[in-house]
Image: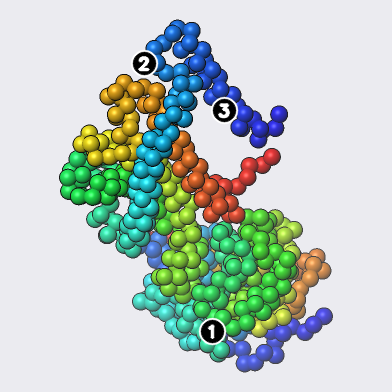
Amino acid sequence: MSRRVARWLAPAAVGAGVLLSWQGLVTAFDVPFYLVPAPSLVAKTLVQDAPLLFDALLVTLHITALALLLAVVLGVAVALVFVQSRIIEMSLFPYAVLLQVTPIVAIAPLIIIWVKNPLAALVVCATIVAIFPIISNTTLGLRSVDPGLADLFRLYGAGRWQTLVRLRVPSALPYFFAGLRVSGGLALIGAVVAEFVAGTGGTSSGLAYQILQAGLQLNIPRLFAALLLITLAGVAIFALVSLAAHLALRRWHESELAPEP
Amino acid sequence: MTPDPSYGRSPRGPVVEMRGASKTYPNGVRALDLINLQVRDGDFATLIGPSGCGKSTLLRMMGGLTSPTAGNVALWPARVAHGERAERPHATRAMHSDGNSPALAFVFQHPTLMPWASVERNVRLPLDLARNEDNVAAKLDAALGLVALRDFARVYPRELSGGMQMRVSIARALVTEPRLLLMDEPFGALDEITRHRLDRDISELWARRSLTVVFVTHSIYEAVFLSTRVLVMSARPGRITGELEITEPHPRTDAFRTSERFARSCQRLSAMLADASGDSVEPRASGA
């Protein structure tokens, strides 16, 4: 069996095995569906509640996408400011760390009070969660310039702008994408957590709100279905970001080269 | 055999001049001590010495990538002098008469190519940085032709062997038609066969164009094969302790490598290097 087939087949076999034994155990021990629903029931619920759940998914994805976009734009902007001078970085970096270590659950209520528009409030929360890997990785990347190439640019009298666009930005790309991969997941987590906090106030209709409601109503199959959708969304975001990284780096960076056969 | 083009080019004015140039690092290490040297138009001057003797620093000083802590460095034709306070490199200021191309180019120890750019985009970088848009295609083609890489214009650096990468680096240096080419142990990391080939190529290029080369190496054979002048340096703090002229006409071929003249020059150079390192013990002790 070729390695390429094994790469897909092996995890798929594990997944199928887990689902089958789950189904088998639930049936064999007659576990009530309000404790652990069988995979078949979860699938059925997913189809039945599709209109409700997919609407909720769209809301959550909307927040996630906006937050990730904002995190990229702001994060890259902050990184560009940081690399202009060590003084600026030294003065501001601790506050970026502060942003990273403060639990979003703790500050979300404040943000929801301060920001009137509910969608905007959720986006702000998710952005705060997602932005740090972009800032730190991009800053590191913009600084990780081959000293020989830096000398070369100096020798040919490259200006600040030329050096930024032709040298620093390309050097930073692999680092930026590594950060983006982490931030993509974090944006989704941020969106879900913020929805939870906002949802307790009854102002949301995203997937987290559906999970919350389903939990209160002991509608466990729907809870599982919503959970499944969030997980799939996370995987899809990761795959998309990985694809973007692959397209940008495949010609030259070690991380995206095809392994030796 | 074609006549040596370095002779008969007249007048052979200075291209680089260093007077009392010294370099002391902030931690007190003296890298270079009172260097006086003149590189004249059409020279193929090689700096040779033990590792750590400051020959790379000397070359970087000529390129304006570092400045002397005492004394000064001057470059022609732009008469850019940079002494203790000079900070910016002078490649852009030392212009050709056409006002576009930098008069000097540098080839580093490593190929130092942009991994994200094709061979073509790497080679045209100096033109792009100078915002020089005249005849880019022709200049690019000529530079790639000189190093026999025309067929590889769209290939990325990591798809090339080490020797080919070095040739890209040389093409990039030549694309601006520099008057002065500074090379810092460019072939040190390559295998001997590739190295001999590139040495031959460089010798040919130098002979064909009005080029002045300052070359750094620690290989006696390479120095003798390539140079019109070899400058011998002592161990740290680096000083120039001797000079050997090699009159063999260019371009030089493999036949020269096996000739008696070659062997004699190598012997003399080797003796001079031994003298230089023996010499350096006393002044270093008294200077410290």
Q: What is the basis of the colouring in this image?
A: rainbow
Amino acid type, residue under disc 3 in the picture: Pro
- The numbered mark, 3 or 2, whose residue comes first in the sequence reads 3
Q: Which mark is residue B6?
A: none
Residue B47: x %, y % from top left = 58, 69
**Could you say which is closer to the camera, residue B208 or residue B19?**
B208
Label 2 sits on a secondary structure element that is loop
The residue beneath circle 3 is: A11
Amino acid type, residue under disc 1 in the picture: Asn
Residue that sits furthest to the bottom in the current view: B11
Give the tally of numbered discs: 3
The residue beneath circle 1 is: B100
The residue beneath circle 2 is: A35
Residue B33: x %, y % from top left = 45, 70
Q: Quick check: B176 left or right of A242?
A: right
Label 1 in the same subunit as label 2: no
Q: Is residue B167 visible?
A: no
Amino acid type, residue under disc 2 in the picture: Leu
* Mark 1 → mark 2, Cα distance in angstroms: 78 Å
Q: Which circle, 1 or 2, is nearer the viewer?
A: 2
Marked residue chain, label 1: B
Marked residue chain, label 3: A
Residue A194: x %, y % from top left = 28, 39
Q: Quick check: A93 left or right of B139?
A: left
Q: Quadrant of residue B9?
A: bottom right
